[in-house]
Amino acid sequence: MDTVKAKRIAKKTAKHTFWIASDVFFLGLKIVGAFALIAVAAVAIYTCFFLYYLNNEIATGFEIDSRDFTMARSSVISYIDSHTGREIELVTIQSTEFRRWASYDEFPDHLINALISIEDHRFFSHQGVDWYRTAGAFMNMFLGMRDTFGGSTITQQVIKNLTHEDDATVQRKLQEIFRALEYEKQFNKEEILELYLNLVYFGHGTYGIGAAAYYYFNKEVSELTLPEAASIISITNNPSRFSPYANRESNKERQEIILRRMYELGYIRTEQELNQALRSVLHFQRGIDDNAEQVIYTWFEEAVMRDVVSDLVTRLGYSEQVARRLLHSGGLRIIATIDPTMQAIVDEIYQNPENLPEVTGNTQQRLQSGVILADPYTGEIKALVGGVGVKTRNMLLSRATQTRRPPGSAIKPIAAYAPALEYGMLTPDTIYNDSADIELSGTTWLPRNASRRYQGEVSVRYALRHSINTVAAMVVDQLTPRSSFLFMRDVLRFNLDPQDENYAPLAAGQLTWGATVREMASAYTMFPNDGVRVELRTYSMIYNYNGEILLDNTAPIENVAINDVTAFWMTDMLRDVVLHGTGGSASLGAHMPVAGKTGTTTNSEDRWFVGFTPYYLAAVWTGFDTPVEMVSSGNPAAQIWRMIMDPIHADLETKSFNTPRDVELQPVINPWEFVTAFYTVRAVDVHGEILFEDVIRSTVGAEVIEDAPEILGYVLQGQAFGAITLTADSNRNIILFIYMSEEEYYAPPPDPDQPEDPYDPLDPNSINPNDTPP
């Protein structure tokens, strides 16, 4: 019986266990399935994000066309004749580097084989990326914890040479991979090899295999032998290390590595051929560069060339090396903004130092100067000179576009008065106190005036006209140095050091790095141009060798800096500077209005004038390359400005500056108007004799109350205090107290019953009360 019962229990237990196990199994399946679904969803989401990242961050457009580099074509700078509209050539650009373009057909097989063997032996079989080497490079980074990738194919190196992007990051490497894959869809292997061998640097200023063959062996590329080809290819890894002119032994060692690698890959078929190449003695012979520069470019032409290279880099993404290559041998046609007539006027003045104003102070240096003449409405630079004297070398430092010098007081209109007027903090008639006793809220610094004198209460117009330093400092204090700094940096686009967020740089123009003539000229365009600042430019258009537009620079790059009413009043005050102030040397007479501002730095080491007419704007700097004190009669920069602008405006009609419809400004109650006022506390007797007087200093608008002074022997007549509101006219600020002497005050009154004897002029005994007794 027990056995049967036990069997039943066992059977029941097994059955129960089975169902439990089944439930656990299916529950496990559900859990696994849930995790699988979560994993699939996560992978899908991650994939979407990754694809989005690839599409938007990695697989970005690559717009550089290698066909722009495949032939050595001379680039040309031209200009448009303003009378005929014809394009006239200004200069043909010659290369400053040793380059010779070589076509693929000129490459001997052993040259290509040497390159492929050492750089990318699967070049002809991959589609732009060698996945074996790429995987190894990533493993090297993630497992080896090294920040260098390696593994780049020749195609990827072409991309790198074109863009000059070589930072060792995952994003950059992925971007390079996608670009290489896309690049090989557009260009065949032969085109890629041709471009690579013509872009790569071979040391000593030599770019491309054509120049390298000539420079190292004095022969054409097609004439290179196997040992010579291996020697030249060895240089590309590190020109400073493997150049035979720098290190013959290192070059030989790497040449042998390349030759043995060629033998391993079958490009050298026999051991005898290998040994013969290894034993071959190389005869290096420098070829003479028959393309050495002959043309001396003008200051304007060099400014165009620098701007073109800069824009190709910043706007089209070229590396600087590729941009320079394209400029010198890409067959570009560049349309400059130059006006040859205006440029000739400027050149005539600057090329003969005797034409400049007499300046003394350093007999060891020649007075130098830089000037830019521009159309303030379009931003087109019409004339430009970067130095005094005849230019005899190329790519000198231009004092018009590159040299940075402190602008002195020429900064006041743009860093102090214009933003303060724009923000409603002052008007031309706002009064400030020009005093040595003023205290600024954010500093203990206060500049001295150049004259070492102080004028007391002066208007903004007067302070700007006479370049009063204390008032400019108070205006910057009112603005705050932060607001002034941001206006200069973000609105006017000055290149400033963070330390320039301070009083002396912004109120007195002592900028850490200084400013260029071009920066100053660009900033001042906002005044004649209704408040719109225009970036100055040297060219309007760049065409490639096929005549297609490569860069369109015709539209002015502009931003609204101030409103038109602010621009009007600033122009009006800057006209006063020329008519009645420090800029008188720049006047063009009654027929043409001129507005502008002078600038003088510490010890007169720099002299500036930035001025404009209704037609043109020009900025002039003068000084010595090594700063020393300048001694001159008047401001030489303003005098040069007039020498340039006078003939340019001689035949132009008289014209006025723009005037907005409503130029009214709201009155300003300025908490920083500490305008001195004096008032007088005066005590007189009843007969008008002054008994006491005290002159007290206060401020205009103040309400003052004074108690009557006690005066011995006199009694006050009237109230014991006096109160007035002070005005700017100190002669009207008088608190008057009237007194009577105690003798008179306490004297007994006359007896009414005993009248005085009347005076009878006919009676000789009658006494005249007005007569003085003897």
Image (cartoon, rainbow, N blue to C red):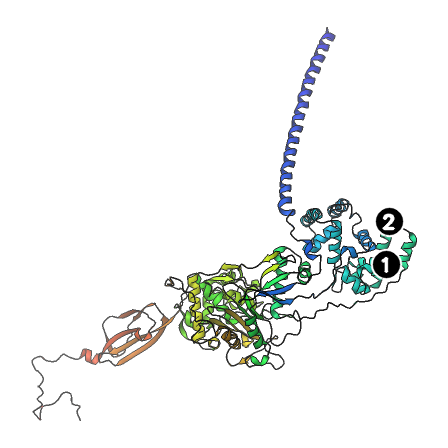
What residue is at 29 percent from the left and 76 percent from the top? Answer: 682
Q: Are marks 2 and 1 in contact (CB under 8 Å)?
A: no
Earlier sequence position, callout 2 versus callout 1: 1
Q: In which quadrant of the rendered view does residue 337 lie?
A: bottom right
What residue is at 63 percent from the left and 47 percent from the top? Answer: 57
Residue that carries the numbered disc 2 in the rendered image? 266
- Is residue 611 rendered to the left or right of residue 209? left
Residue that carries the numbered disc 1 in the rendered image? 227
Viewer-proximal residue among 390 and 597: 390
Mark 2 belongs to which amino acid? Gly
Viewer-proximal residue among 480 and 118: 118
Rendered location of residue 614, percent (x, y): 46, 68
Rendered location of residue 705, percent (x, y): 31, 69
- Is residue 723 rendered to the left or right of residue 566? left
Task: Give the CA distance from mark 2 to mark 1.
Answer: 16 Å
Counting every numbered tag in the picture gives 2
Rendered location of residue 375, percent (x, y): 51, 66
Circle 2 SS class: loop
Depicted 209 relative to depicted 454: above or below: above
Rendered location of residue 68, percent (x, y): 68, 56
